[in-house]
Image: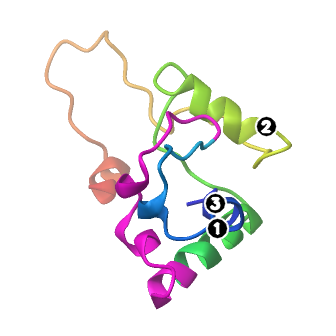
Amino acid sequence: MTYSPTLDKEVEGEYVEQTEPLKIPGCRPVRPEYVIDPMLDRTNQQYSECIRIGVEIPLGDGILLNTWEELQPTTLASFRDETLLGGVTKMMPVIQWTSDQTGPIEPSNSQRRLV
């Protein structure tokens, strides 16, 4: 989503009419027909909303990503790139599990609220 405003400027015509995969920094090239449905029709109001969201995401005070460095190093590196999104900082886990427990692990009250 954060790259959708750039794609909007760079791609001419409809995405499904493109013959080459779309190049998005930090990601494998995406076949045009695999973009999310609202991006397939530029005349649709949902397309405009996707572009607006893509513009507004970087304006937030923070973005939580459910990932870790070893899983998506290239994608996270592109998020940290100051010429792209920039300003991504790694957070430590809120809860750290220990392996020295002998019985089943019971969730705390705060963990139950997250479910």
Q: Give the residue type that dot 2 points to.
A: Asp
Mark 1 burial class by Cα count in 10 Å: few <14, some 14-19, many 20+: some
Quarter of the C terminus within the rendering: bottom left
Q: Residue 7: give its label.
A: 3
State the CA–CA distance, disc 2 to disc 1. Answer: 20 Å
Q: Residue 38: give its label.
A: none
Q: Nearer the viewer, mark 3 or mark 2?
A: 3
Which stretch is magenta?
Answer: 25-48
Q: Kindly identify which residue carries mark 1.
A: 8
**Horizontal and vertical percent for residue 40?**
41, 70
Q: Secondary structure at mark 3?
A: helix
Quarter of the image holding residue 30? top left
Q: Kindly identify which residue carries mark 2.
A: 81
Q: Is residue 35 left or right of residue 84?
A: left
**Horizontal and vertical percent for residue 62?**
68, 57
**Horizontal and vertical percent for residue 77?**
68, 30
Q: Residue at x 46, y 24 (%)?
A: 71
Q: Secondary structure at mark 2?
A: loop
Task: Identify which residue, 74 or 25, lies in the foreground.
Answer: 25
Membership of 50 in magenta stretch: no
State the CA–CA distance, disc 3 to disc 1. Answer: 4 Å
